[in-house]
Amino acid sequence: MMSEETENIMVVYDDHSEQRSLSLDDTSSTEESPDETRHSLESNDVIPYIGQRFTTHDAAYDFYSEFAKRNGFSIRRHRTEGKDGVGKGLTRRYFVCHRAGNTPVKAMTENKPQRNRKSSRCNCQAYMRISKTTEMGAAEWRVTGFGNNHNHELLEANQVRFLPAYRTISDTDKSRILMFAKTGISVQQMMRLMELEKCVEPGYLPFTEKDVRNLLQSFRKVDPEDESIDLLRMCRNIKDKDPNFQFQYTLDLNNRLENIAWSYASSIRSYEVFGDALVFDTTRRLTAFDMPLGIWVGMNNYGMPCFFGCVLLREENLRSFSWALKAFTGFMNGKAPQTILTDQNMCLKEAISIEMPTTKHALCIWLIVAKFPSWFNAVLGERYNEWKVEFYRLFNMESIEEFELGWRDMVTSFGLHTNRHIASLFALRSLWALPYLRSYFFAGMTTAGHAKSINAFIQRFLSAQTRLSHFVEQVATAVDFKDQAGEQQTMQQNIQNICLKTGAPMESHAAIILTPFAFSKLQEQLVLAAHYASFQMDEVFLVRHHTKLEGGRSVYWSPQEGIINCSCHQFEFSGILCRHALRVLSTGNCFQIPERYLPLRWRRISTPSAKLLHTSSSDHAERVQLLQNMVSTLITESAKSKDRLNIATDQVSILLSRIKEHPVSSSGMREIQVEAVASEFLYRRIPNPSSGDPASLLHHTTPFWCVVRLVCAKCILR
């Protein structure tokens, strides 16, 4: 609705000396007499009037724009006129409502699709005309025509800001947006962050999400060849700064970039421990450049995704995938994973069989399930959800024979004999159904929860792509951000007081060695083990639930060899002993889990001081990482009792004083000595826990952590 002030001025003002019509197509150039005007250069009046003066036509435009904004519309420049013709010797300008005129009809082209967007123009007649005059040698602009007749509803004050004319992104905000884009956060997250920074309510920034997306898109409209050159230059610059950064690329016959793969030093180090099972996601594309993107991701000992490498390909064919896999194993010193999960891509399947012959290839179940709605919703109708329940039941079976019998019954029950997707799934069953995969290690990445976290991790550096040349840096920033967040989550896990549920010595033993994430998985099995009974048969134990009279699992245990195997294959699949094996160990008076069944990849990884003394030739960043790991252990152990915390605080203060005594320029053996001092403190100065409530100590660790951070900073400066 219009304001009272606007209603009072809904009339047309025009200089009678010009005798012109209100049509915006009029081209008369008669000007008003000077004595009929009021002098108001750079006027502060709120309503335009005939004779109003401005020093420049831009000043007149700004004034009319502010008037329009206050009254619920925006304006645009409509036409310019000059003494010698349009645009020559400029003497007159027209500013009109943004809804003035009509949208011209576009010529239809058969081969080109038309965008049938609704136009906002409705031939509105509101306008302001200014003309140029010269008095005593000084030029100025005067209002010679003004009309405020609108044939459309005017916007409210809280709506007018959404008009394109009033949505602007300042240079400062542009820089901020581009910085956010490099971190990989989404446009929605950018908007929320900037609202917080500017202390404005949600939706009250001077621009919208669409404006931000358009800004990011404008940075992508560049020459692909120039982008490729910049991308290679970026990789070489990173390599110069960090020799452990790895990248490879290929050029086509025209000497243009065809494929490029890369991995960071931290990723290569992580792969050494956690590269046994990984996901190779090739379902994404850099839409701005129409390039397939492949990402290698694994899972660390705290159950969090870890990045291993990236590849950009021009084509998705056998040759490209083979090159990508070969480049990746080259980055990882020739070490292939035990298992690899991918999408249903037959070219990729063949490439893996060629380049990674010893690796077990499987299909990501979550990528298969994501296609079910389009495959089966229309076919099954109301029975779709019922069919999904049956599918998951079959998927989780342990016996191959039971799976295949159940599959045939399912096909018959739901009438899917002729469905091509069902036929394809059954043909590929050995690549996705758990009964065929339980003998292979997948680190739990087949579960829906881990699938969601991996997907969110990958999406982080795809949500706000900028320049292709910046993508390597953008991924590095996202990975670094994830690593920092992972360190915080690791710290939180380690500080949490672990609650023992069974009181069994095996539980206490595992709690010390395994990470909280892995221990929680083992603890679940320990609790369930109490519900099972074991019966020794010839060379094996039969283990079954106490309520069952038939069935069960066969467990082979050799105490002399320290070997225990269960027919359910849970340890082989997840690296965590099953309830059946744990029941047999408990029955056999085994008070500690055998070392081989507490795998390194699920342990709390720490580095003793002896190892530190042999790292004089290692990379500085690696030694910093070692120190950070020790500090993490320090916090964990110190938070277990008040006595430990008091001792740790005193000793860290002493250590900090000793480090300050070393000059910053010291190198070589002094660096090793500083780190050895820290190591000795971490591993030899903390006594066993005493009585006290560990939970009450958590708030005390904050100042203590500040001291530890100072110690780290001093060592890192070395």
Image (cartoon, rainbow, N blue to C red):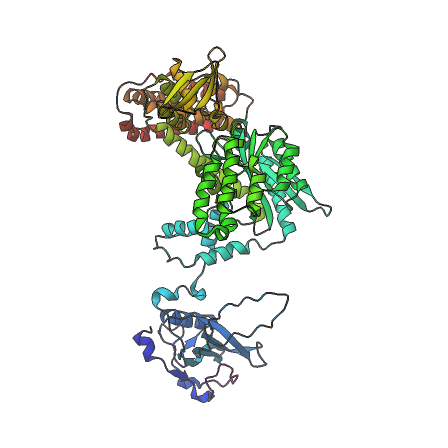
The magenta-colored residue range is 19-30
- Above or below for 491 versus 310: above
Image-quadrant location for residue 511: top left
**Residue appearing at x 53%, y 55% in the figure:** 217
Going by the image, does 304 lie left or right of 243?
A: left
Q: Position of residue 631 (x, y in %)?
A: 41, 26
Q: Is residue 80 visible?
A: yes
Q: Position of residue 421 (x, y in %)?
A: 56, 46
Q: Please tell me which residue lies in front, 183 or 509.
A: 509
> Is the N terminus in the top left, top right, bottom left or bottom right quadrant?
bottom left
**Residue appearing at x 46%, y 58% in the figure:** 210
Q: Is residue 4 magenta?
A: no
Q: Please tell me which residue lies in front, 661 or 46.
A: 46
Q: Position of residue 196 (x, y in %)?
A: 36, 50
* Magenta stretch, overall SS: loop
Going by the image, does 558 lie left or right of 71?
A: right
